[in-house]
Image (spheres, grey):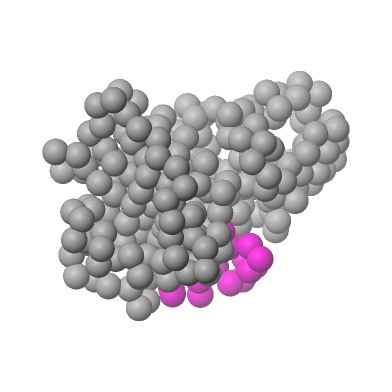
């Protein structure tokens, strides 16, 4: 019987990262993806990534807005429960809120959501998912071998003294680092995919998660969706 769970994310970057991370985590377990995108409050199928022998089915919903993650989970809850889904996971950034807002955001993540049998885990990427990319420093040389430690420091990220989750706007910092060698980072598909492909998922799993507690929590929830009985 195919195991089914759902992941609701705030944007395209989170969508593509989640699909790649789940593929790596699943390993030899056959995994397929049903990808939806929110438009005017409704989710529509935009892609299906099959597997010849799927044992895990994941619905990945791009809510296109951090504020829509919770509301879409609430709207889709009953249909997912009826369809036999075992877990719902949500992911949204903290930014444009500040570090001072994190405690209040966390307190309100699950307020107003159903609690009658289908577990819901919602996570904050602190401050943005790009903080996880910053912290996986080995990927910079795969973007461009001219990105040195000196370039990281000059553009606002000295990982010897700060953690990436302390950076107020990680996407902006990541963009500055890339721009220092004539590359770009924006939310367009090509540039997002370049970064997703450059990341070391082994490094993320073994080391980066130890430096990024929000990534650690997200991975634990994904593993629950993949492997819990």
Query: Is 106 located above or below residue 144 in the figure?
Result: below
Does the magenta segment cover residue 155? no
Residue 70 in view here: no
x%, y% of residue 228?
A: 21, 43
Query: Is 120 located above or below residue 174 in the figure?
Result: below
| Chief secondary structure of the magenta portion | helix
Is 56 on the left-hand or right-hand side of 218?
left
Is 89 on the left-hand or right-hand side of 174?
left
Q: Nearer the viewer, residue 17 or 76?
A: 76
Q: Quadrant of the C terminus?
A: top left
Q: Residue furthest bottom?
A: 112
Q: Quadrant of the N terminus?
A: top left
Which residue is painted at 54% across and 27% down in the image? 200
Which residue is painted at 50% across and 46% down in the image? 15
Which residue is painted at 53% across and 48% down in the image? 14
Give the magenta range: 93-108
Is 148 on the left-hand or right-hand side of 193?
right
Q: Nearer the viewer, residue 218 or 16?
A: 16
Which residue is painted at 34% across and 52% down in the image? 6
Residue 95 in view here: yes
Q: Quadrant of residue 3?
A: top left
């Amino acid at each position: 019987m195919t195991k089914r769970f759902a992941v609701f994310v705030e944007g395209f970057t989170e969508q593509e990262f989640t699909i790649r991370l789940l593929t790596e985590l699943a390993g030899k377990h056959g995994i397929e993806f049903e990808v939806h995108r929110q438009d005017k409050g409704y989710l529509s199928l935009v892609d299906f990534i099959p597997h010849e022998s799927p044992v895990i089915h994941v619905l990945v919903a791009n809510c296109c807005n951090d504020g829509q993650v919770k509301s879409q989970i609430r709207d889709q809850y009953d249909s997912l429960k009826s369809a036999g889904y075992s877990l719902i996971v949500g992911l949204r950034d903290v930014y444009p809120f500040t570090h001072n807002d994190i405690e209040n955001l966390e307190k309100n993540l699950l307020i107003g959501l159903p609690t009658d049998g289908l577990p819901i885990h919602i996570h904050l990427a602190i401050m943005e998912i790009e903080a996880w990319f910053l912290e996986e420093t080995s990927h910079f040389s795969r973007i461009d071998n001219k990105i040195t430690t000196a370039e990281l420091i000059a553009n606002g990220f000295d990982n010897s003294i700060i953690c990436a989750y302390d950076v107020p706007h990680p996407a902006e910092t990541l963009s500055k680092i890339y721009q220092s060698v004539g590359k770009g980072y924006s939310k367009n598909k090509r540039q997002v995919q370049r970064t997703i492909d450059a990341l070391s998922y082994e490094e993320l799993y073994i080391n980066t998660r130890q430096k990024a507690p929000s990534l650690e929590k997200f991975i634990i929830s994904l593993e629950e969706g993949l492997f819990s009985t």
